Image (tube, rainbow, N blue to C red):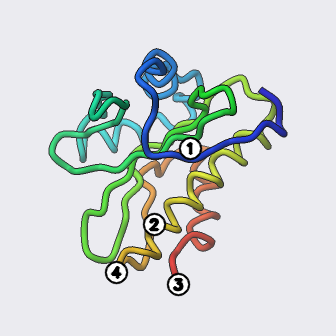
Amino acid sequence: MTLHESIVITSTLALEQRPALEELLFFNANQHRVRNGIEHSIEAYGAPEIHAQDGALRIRIGNLGVQSLFAVSAAGRPVGVAVFVHLTDERFVVLHLGVAPGLDAAARNSTILLKLMHEIRRLARRTHGVNHIELVYTQGPANQAANRLHGIFAPG
């Protein structure tokens, strides 16, 4: 995958992409960077599960009613995922974020992360009463960038 390859954000993923989604969500080589945040999210909200619904892959976490967004390459392969929930009237909580390891560069990972967060922001702005987006991953170097994004992505 190159830095210039087209990425589409979608809420569903083709059934045949299950192995790629499992790799991205559960066996991601970058998990160590946000390990504490992942553990906190699972302890507080539950573990994500991949399931098939209406002919497509989705992610669920218990009975939370989470929403998922997938960054998909032109070849149809998932290269990023965001799982979030509208927990209270005023906030969306991003429970899990993942970007495929081994992409061209950190800039590519940032581009995918930004696209996912921009889409969450767009959805938050369209949801009456939501005035901020909270990221559960609160530990490690990856969160330093996420904290900087918080001001950018707070709806307003």
Disc 2 target residue: 123
For disc 3, the neighbor class at 10 Å (few under 14, some 14 to 19, many from 20) is few
Disc 3 target residue: 156
Residue at image point 38% right, 52% down: 84
Q: Tell me the mark number nearer the camera, choosing from 1 and 4.
A: 4
For disc 1, the neighbor class at 10 Å (few under 14, some 14 to 19, many from 20) is some
Disc 4 target residue: 128
Disc 1 target residue: 140
Mark 3 or mark 4: name the one nearer the start of the chain: 4
Q: CA distance from mark 2 to mark 3?
A: 12 Å
Are the residues at dot 3 and dot 1 in contact (C-beta closer than 8 Å)? Answer: no
Amino acid type, callout 3: Gly
Q: Tell me the mark number nearer the camera, choosing from 2 and 1.
A: 2
Residue at image point 51% right, 19% down: 20
Q: CA distance from mark 2 to mark 1?
A: 27 Å
Q: CA distance from mark 3 to mark 4?
A: 12 Å
The foreground one among 32 and 45 is 45
